[in-house]
Structure formats: structure tokens, C-alpha cells
Amino acid sequence: MKTIQIFDPSLCCSTGVCDAEVDQELVRFAADAAWAREQGIQVDRINLAQQPLEFANNPLVKAVLQSSLAATDTKAPLLRLRAEREWPQINAVRERHGSRVALVALQDCEPIGVERLRALVRAGNESVRTAQVA
């Protein structure tokens, strides 16, 4: 069975309907996760507030958190300043490419750099699935 692991930020639940203001993105994602399960894909949602050791024990997640201060939500003033400089780039990528989604199977070697990314998206690569998001 294929498995997708989702590492969520600290949430009270995964549905997005617990707060006074409903987070529509979480509601939509919960529906997408349900659809994936119906297709025979195991979807594991890991919540930082409830399963912090899963974050710490996953080398890939740990590397992302260590390399992106914006993802860590740091409170240290100097680190916060550096993190704030990351957000314009993150938002630019989200705005420019946010209508496309790519699900990539776990790779033996991280697809970092132009050549590895090109190899990853070449026609016939079974580990990549892309879709246009409405």
C-alpha cells in the first residue's frame, strides 16, 4: 500500500473546524486526504502538538525545519529577522506555482539542484504525480 505522511503544524485537530474561524484550507485538505484513502492510499497525518517526536525522529522533516527558520516559528529576535526574510521567497513561490501540486515518492537521494530536479520530472518517472489545482 502506498503511504503519504503529512507533517502538520501544531493543531488542535486535523479538520480545521475546532476554532471560532474555520480554516477552509484544512477543511479542503481533510477532504483530499479522505479521497486519497478511498483510492487505497494510506494517509498518515502527524501533528506537531500531539506527536513532536515523529518530527524530531524523521531526518527529512528535521532537515527542513533546521534549514528554514520560517518553518520553525522561532521567537529569538535575530533568528526571527532572518526568518522574515524567507517569507517573501516562500510567498513568491506559492503565488507563482501554487496552482500546481506534485506528489513525489521518497527518493534515495534528495532532488536538490537543477540536474536532480530535471531527472525527477522527466517523462516516464513513476515517482512523480502532478495535478493542476482549481
Image (spheres, rainbow, N blue to C red):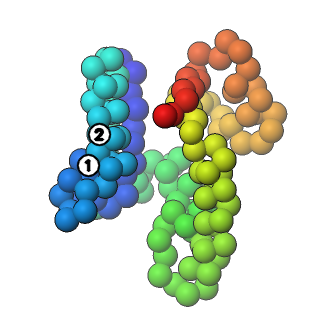
- Do we see residue 52 in this rendering? no
Asked whether the beta carbons under mark 2 and mark 1 sit within 8 Å of each other, the answer is yes
Secondary structure type for disc 1: loop
Residue 65 point in image, percent of width and height: 52, 60
Query: Is 94 on the left or on the right of 39, as rendered?
Result: right
Q: Position of residue 76 (x, y in %)?
A: 52, 84
Among all residues in the image, which is located at the extreme right?
115
- Residue at the spot x=62%, y=81% of the render? 81
Q: Is residue 62 visible?
A: yes
How many labels sit on residues?
2
Residue beneath the point at 59% across and 51% down: 94
Q: Secondary structure at mark 2?
A: helix
Quarter of the rendering containing residue 10:
bottom left
Residue at numbered disc 1: 14
User: Residue farthest to the top?
Assistant: 124
Residue 59 is labelled as none
- Figure check: 8 above or below 78: above
Residue 122 locus on image (x, y percent): 73, 20
Nearest the viewer among 57 and 3 is 3
Q: Which mark is residue 30?
A: 2
Q: Earlier in the sequence, mark 2 or mark 1?
A: 1
